[in-house]
Amino acid sequence: MLLDKVLEKENLHDVFLGLGSNLGDRGENLDHAISNIEKRIGEVIATSAFYLTDPVGFQSDNQFLNAVCEVRTKLTPLEVLQRTKDIEIEMGRDSKSKNQIYHDRIIDIDLLLFDNDILDTEGLTLPHPYLHKRDFVLTPLAEIAGEYEHPVLHKTINQLKKELD
């Protein structure tokens, strides 16, 4: 029985998800997304405060509310990605941004980090390729995981945030 518990824990992964909303009741949208993440992906271990930010990469009169949550899951990175897409669609998001063309959205859930995995496929890049360039990601991520080391850049989230400031 003890061995089963140890093996079960070995199969758990630490995942950091970035959340953003700039349409409707943004706080409610983030809360709803976090609730769905807990139901479909795994235990939410930590959630940052919600941060009000200006849109990046496009013009809009609507500011974003952003946050990051840490999730412990048994799922693979691609399973996590698919479930985040399902949550977005069910919450009313009709399409993901492509080729860095961004637009207003009710919810955006980005897979930022998955353990210390490095992955580069057509559908998923880990760590998130823009994580270290975006204050709206680094600020909430530093709040809950400042000492976490970026697996490619080999710098802590706090160091990356400081470099960006």
Image (tube, rainbow, N blue to C red):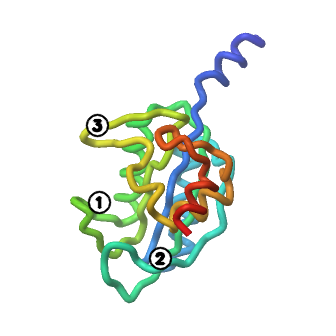
Question: Mark 3: few, some, or many residues within 10 Å (few <14, many ≥20)?
Answer: few
Amino acid under disc 1: Lys
- Reading the image, the residue beneath label 1 is 96
Where on the picture, by quarter, is residue 81? top left
**Callout 1 secondary element:** loop
**Callout 3 secondary element:** loop
Amino acid under disc 3: Thr
Which residue is nearer to you in this view: 42 or 119? 119
**Cα–Cα gap, marks 2 and 1:** 16 Å
Relative to residue 106, is residue 39 drawn left or right?
right
Residue at left offset 34%, top offset 75%: 104
Amino acid under disc 2: Phe
- Reading the image, the residue beneath label 3 is 121
Relative to residue 33, is residue 23 drawn left or right?
left
Residue at left offset 66%, top offset 53%: 146
**Cα–Cα gap, marks 2 and 3:** 28 Å
Where on the picture, by quarter, is residue 55? bottom left
Could you tell me residue 116's position as x and y percent?
Answer: 53, 34
Which residue is nearer to you in this view: 31 or 69? 69
Identify the mark nearer the N-term, 2 or 1. Answer: 2
Foreground disc of the pair 1, 3: 3
Residue at left offset 66%, top offset 51%: 145
The label number, if any, that marks residue 64 in the structure image: 2
